[in-house]
Image (cartoon, coloured by chain):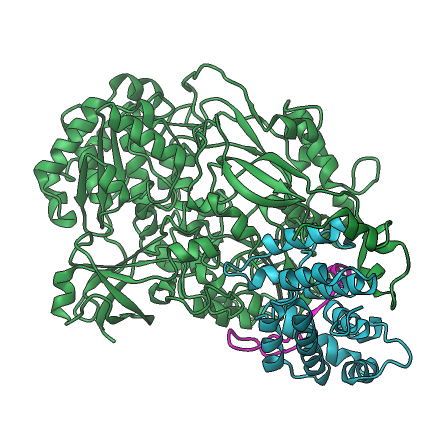
Chain colours: A cyan, B green
Amino acid sequence: MPDSSPSLLALTLAGQALLQSDPNRIAVPSGADGPLAGQIRLAQAAPDAVTQEYTRLFLNPAGVECHLWQSVHAAEPRLFGPAHHSALEWFRRFGAEPQQSNEPADHLGLLLLFYARLIEEGVPGDVTGAYFNDHIAWAAEFTSKLRQQARHPLYLALAREIQSILASGGTQAM
Amino acid sequence: MAITRRHLFQAGGAGLFAAPSAFGAFEQYLQPASRSAADVRKLVTCCGFCTPACGMQVTVQDGVATFVEGLPGDAHGAGHLCGKGTSSANFFYDPDRLKYPMKRTNPRRGLDDDPGFVRISWTEALDTIAEKFGGYIKNHGAESLLFLSRNSPDLLTRLINALGIVNRVDHNDICFTADQAVRKYTTGGKTWCEDFENARYIVLFGWDLVAKNKIPAVKGILAARQKGVKVIHFSTNQTATSRMASEYIPVRPGSDPAIALAMINVMLTENLFDQDFVTKYTNFHQYESEIRSHFAPYTPEWASPLCDVPADVIRRIGQEFGRARGMAPAYKKTLTANYTNATQMSHAQVILQILGGTIDREGGNYFARTHSVPGVDTVYPRPANPPKTGRRIDGRDKLFFVNDVDQGIFATLADGMLRRYPGMIKGAFINAYDVKGFPQPLRMVEALKTVEFIVTYDFLPSDTVMLSDIVLPSSHQFESNDIITRNFNAKYPQSVVRQAVAAPYFEARGTGNLVIELGKRLCPDYFKTPDGAWISGSTLLNEKTKRAGLGETFAEFRAKGIVESPAPFVPRTNFTAPNAGGKCQIYVPQFKDKGFEPLPHWHLKREQPSAAYPYYFVTYIPGTHRRNTTQNCSILHEMMPTNQVTIHPATAARHGIREGDPVRISSRVGAIELPARLSRTVREDVVLVPHGFGHRSRSLGNAANKGARDGDLIPDLTPEEMLALMDFGGSGAIMDAVVNIGRA
């Protein structure tokens, strides 16, 4: 793994935190430290507040603050847009596909978990760099919105973690 | 970037699943791929935006609709789609669509209150709804539940009837109820198929069918024009249809009945009607004396000052229409159906068609020839329904002929909930209706605030969703399977498949599934097959397909796409108006029996210009959008993102209004503000605003807070007013407001 790659733990925790509204369903390895891991552990004692905040931020019928899917951040926002097909293509070329076939593949949580696995498997830097450019770099806009809108410390920590992933991954992609 | 075999090899040969991932999360959300390349196919289905159901060919990649085009060879769309149909995929993949069931946590209910929604499971949602609705029925009677929904699909009707629901209310009063009520007693039913292609003369009142993009109708009108057939368009404003017509004749809003009555007068006075048809198939001779004397005063000279059309023009058109045996189709959403004199207008229009001898005849309006698809009650006979007892919240029980065609009344609902029977409605199920569809929508919001428990089943987070306790995500036509029997352009039976080109996304569910699950909880005996199993939507669809002769199974029908059963057009000789001896009725004794007019009279519309409100207010549905449902669709939003108010330049000059200026439009019930668009296409006394804009739900990323609601200016009604105005067909009268304007 290149030195500049984001840590597997950071990618995995961030990916899960984006996919799971219930903090008790996020696996935090024993010994994991850092602000996001700490916030998840704290939230596991009071999960309802996180679940409500997750809904408010990402799913709220009364107004989503931060859309989780890359296609929604495109010039013409939509679900299942070109980024979904591109993500599926990346996944398939490495023999994978999402468990949930009824939801878009370009969910930032899935994209981060896949990125982690590419790095973990030692896929060459030019490939992970290309993937980063295709499917991770866009999250800068998402992160900015998340930082502005999050009211729960877990999601503020998550925003910082993704920002740091973007910084290290961006270095690698260059 | 191209991924090579080397990369895959480096990734572990067996891919990313050869060894467990470091923290186990990867395998929790991703699995080994079931295919190595995209699955791309083309599937046949039909459009769901409007009733013609034009054939569609959808390119689907991995279950995602990526391109939508017209179906070549289709008798309806002829391979074409309108802008709405073409934009279906963008509508379907709207990022703001509802994705999961939600429940409200904030008890404060208002358009500006954050509902505090939290995600729940379908099971929790259904259990909660069943518990609440069951409790209301037990403690307050079935009258305490409001189903704000159309009466389809048939499974939903079964649920409503099984629960003894008396208050099912739909929007049809603002579309076509008056016409439907009149047609039942004149011709026996809806004659909404127009044989424009073979027409000899066409008179259209208001209906902007070209801008509405009804492709079969537009094709027909074009074919008629190309053959030199004269098309007359009476309208308050010059529209796309006016431009396609031979003659556009501007009329005073709400005066259409005066023109129709005067045309009848000309045809009767000069005996320019189809004597053979009238003699054989109508009650004309039975009531000839009453009919002739009734229409005698309605001369073109009488009509002219009412409608601002010269008498000689009305006379000429009456003569041409009579000599040619013309057609004057009534159509839902025509301007003529939206005044308080709509019942009279519908009756007059039917009489024009009867006198023209064009009811169910070539070149006229005809009854749809369709495949006979059995309903659920035929496939799975049900136990007897409980009697429907209780008070009718919209006052429909006072309007015999509206009751008779089983349509609800939007225009009187808020009044019923707030004034007549406050607190009676405890629970409401709202099936994809937005408060914006009501006259005085803010009054409807106040009415809904009095309801203890609201469930909304919808596709997008409408303003109604913001008022709801439980929100259920509905599926789109691309996620649904059904048999669509066409009732436009249906000289012979044609059925087209509606198929799920995509699996339901997120946790959206179709109406059938929702209804069956509620039925299991609330009235299980009604949702079982004769052998005791639960009714299944797919089994029911297979059975319907087979019994309709469309295929052995729905899958077989799906593979065919469209089933046509060509047959010669045999004109009807036996009509089905009740107790009319198989004849069409010009004079309707049943109307008289109920205290109404057996022949159409002239009535002014409800509101007339005054010093305080000197302008007629006219609203319309622009062809770009489908009512108030598509403003958030990215493509359609780009085409028409907001609404404006159209005013004649001379009128604008009197108020010091220039193009683009903000204009305040006020009526006796409210005010809105919109930018001015100056155009000579409207009369100087008309203020024109398109419907569908002014969404308040901030979750609609494109549509939120764009434009203004026309409904804020339109007074709602009471059943008593309808009766006093002889609007016994129950028109919502959404064109009846008068307004004032001023630079904001």
- Name which quarter of the figure residue B546 lies in: top right
Q: How many marks?
A: 0
Q: Vertically, is B739 above or below B187?
A: below
> Looking at the image, which is closer to me, A75 or B398?
A75
Question: Residue A108: x and y, percent?
Answer: 68, 65
* Residue B112 pos. (x, y %): 51, 77
> Looking at the picture, how far across and down is residue B293, in whole percent?
19, 34
Report the residue that reaches farthest toward the top.
Answer: B568
Question: Image height check: is B336 above or below B662?
Answer: above
Q: Is residue B593 above or below residue B7?
A: above
The residue shown at (79%, 44%) is: B34
Q: Quadrant of residue B107?
A: bottom right
What secondary structure predominates along the stretch shown in magenta?
Answer: loop
User: Which residue is depicted at the point 68% across and 36% down?
Assistant: B377
Q: Position of residue B631 (x, y in %)?
A: 45, 58
Magenta residues, as a range?
A: B104-128
Q: Is residue A65 visible?
A: no
Q: Which quadrant, please, contains the C terminus of chain B? A: bottom left
Question: Which residue is drawn at the image coordinates 17% and 43% (left, top)?
Answer: B249
Q: Nearer the viewer, residue B206 or B102?
A: B102
Q: Note whether residue A140 is visible.
A: yes
